[in-house]
Amino acid sequence: MIDEQRLIELFLHLASLDAPSLEERAVADAVKAELTSLGLDVAEDDAASRIGGTTGNLLCRVPANWALQDLPDAGKPSGQEVAFRQDQAALLFSTHLDTVQPCRGKHVFLGDDRIFRSDGTTILGADDLAGVSAVLALLHELRDRKMPHRPLELLFSVAEEVHLQGISVFDTHVLKAREGYVLDTSGAPGIGVIAAPGHVHLHFEVHGRPAHAGIAPETGISAIAVAAQGIARMQLGRIDPETTANIGRIEGGGETNIVAASCKVTAECRSLDPQRLTAQVQHMVDCMELAAAGAGASVTVQTHASYHPYRVDPDQPVARRFQVACIAIGKSARLIATGGGSDLNVLSRAGLSGMVLSCGMQQVHSNAENLALDDLSDLVLLLQALVDAPF
Ligand SMILES: [Zn+2]
């Protein structure tokens, strides 16, 4: 059993603070205070100035067997166990401090049904304060249980909800862990995301030729018509089981008596497979360029890889450890692929072998967001089992 009352207080305290993306100061200070009170050092990087926020990413290193350091020798576990943990590789637990809007002035509470909710006028913030409070509770539990443990790295990123901005400027070279878990997806604990798509943003600007639409339309080239032809040539929607593509916005032209000189189109594609992602981007660019060339127009294209895909083999240690930990707490593990991005898309590009784990949060990014206390407790137990795994 874990200390449920402490967990409730940790979560309610963090969730009561305002933490919109780029304004995470209050919740970051609360996390720092908690870690400092446990005798741990926290480093804050320079993300605030680099992305225009108030707060940097926090990194806390928990040395192996930190939880035993204040124990008298007589109270310490066997030297063999302690030495074994000392030599184990570091494990990373990563969460994010910011929440989506509306999140100012939250009133959060635990209902008689043991479910955390807001009063309905804001989100709850379980995304991702469930993960944050579980990590903090884990440290207390390790210490209360006098548990020998491997070294840990705890990363608390900022501005995750606004295109992973915080983690994108984090210096991943400082991480010692080669494996880790990002605690940041919906559902009761037991779900592990082993694959997520890469995401590319496309921006087209078609340049036609303006003309009077009534007097000399034949001298003009409609950028809108060209963009429409380019889009009509594209394969969009679900391209294959792992790849999707979508047009986000089309805008251009002016008065009806002018053949439109310019038209802008934004689009995206996602794929779990880096090659198919590249191929789909190229296909969309080709379609627009062909349409422009056919009409005597031109097009400028900008593509931006917002994040990169990752995939972990279920036999890799990071996935096996998760499955072992689920069994240890009486849950069955479910390994899935997802369509969304997370900090792991950035961390895995830096060489981290990792998974995103479900944290109990439900109906995230809505005012109906909620979190069952029992799921949050299970998350703490799951983290403990991950730390305790023999590999
Ligand atoms: Zn999240």
Image: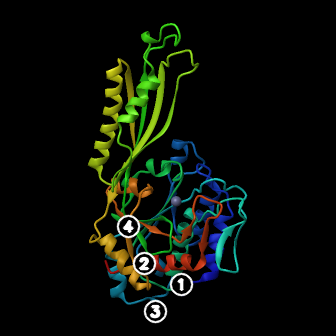
Q: Nearer the viewer, mark 4 or mark 1?
A: 4
Give the CA separation, mark 4 to mark 3.
46 Å
Q: Which mark is residue 336?
A: 4
Of the residues under marks 1 and 3, which one precedes in the sequence? Answer: 3
The residue singled out by tag 1 in the image is: 144
Q: Nearer the viewer, mark 4 or mark 3?
A: 4
Q: Nearer the viewer, mark 4 or mark 2?
A: 4
Q: Callout 2: helix, strand or loop?
A: loop
Of the residues under marks 1 and 2, which one precedes in the sequence? Answer: 2
Quadrant of the snapshot with the C terminus: bottom left
Q: Which mark is residue 65?
A: 2
Q: Which mark is residue 74?
A: 3
User: Which amino acid type is marked by label 2?
Assistant: Asn
Task: Give coordinates of residue 27: x percent, y percent.
Answer: 62, 60
Q: Mark 4 touching mark 1, by CB under 8 A?
A: no
Give the CA separation, mark 4 to mark 1.
34 Å
User: Which amino acid type is marked by label 4?
Assistant: Ile
Q: Residue furthest bottom?
A: 74
Of the residues under marks 4 and 3, which one precedes in the sequence? Answer: 3
Q: Based on the displayed image, in which of its 4 quarters is residue 124 positioned? A: bottom right
Residue shown at 42% from the left, 57% from the top: 339
Q: Callout 3: helix, strand or loop?
A: helix
Q: Callout 1: helix, strand or loop?
A: helix
Q: Residues within 10 Å of mark 2 (few under 14, many from 20)?
A: many
Give the CA separation, mark 1 to mark 3.
16 Å
Q: Mark 4 touching mark 2, by CB under 8 A?
A: no
Q: Is residue 274 visible?
A: yes
Q: Nearer the viewer, mark 1 or mark 3?
A: 1
User: Which amino acid type is marked by label 3?
Assistant: Ala
Task: Give coordinates of residue 139: x percent, y percent.
Answer: 51, 75
Q: Based on the displayed image, in which of its 4 quarters is residue 320 positioned? A: bottom left
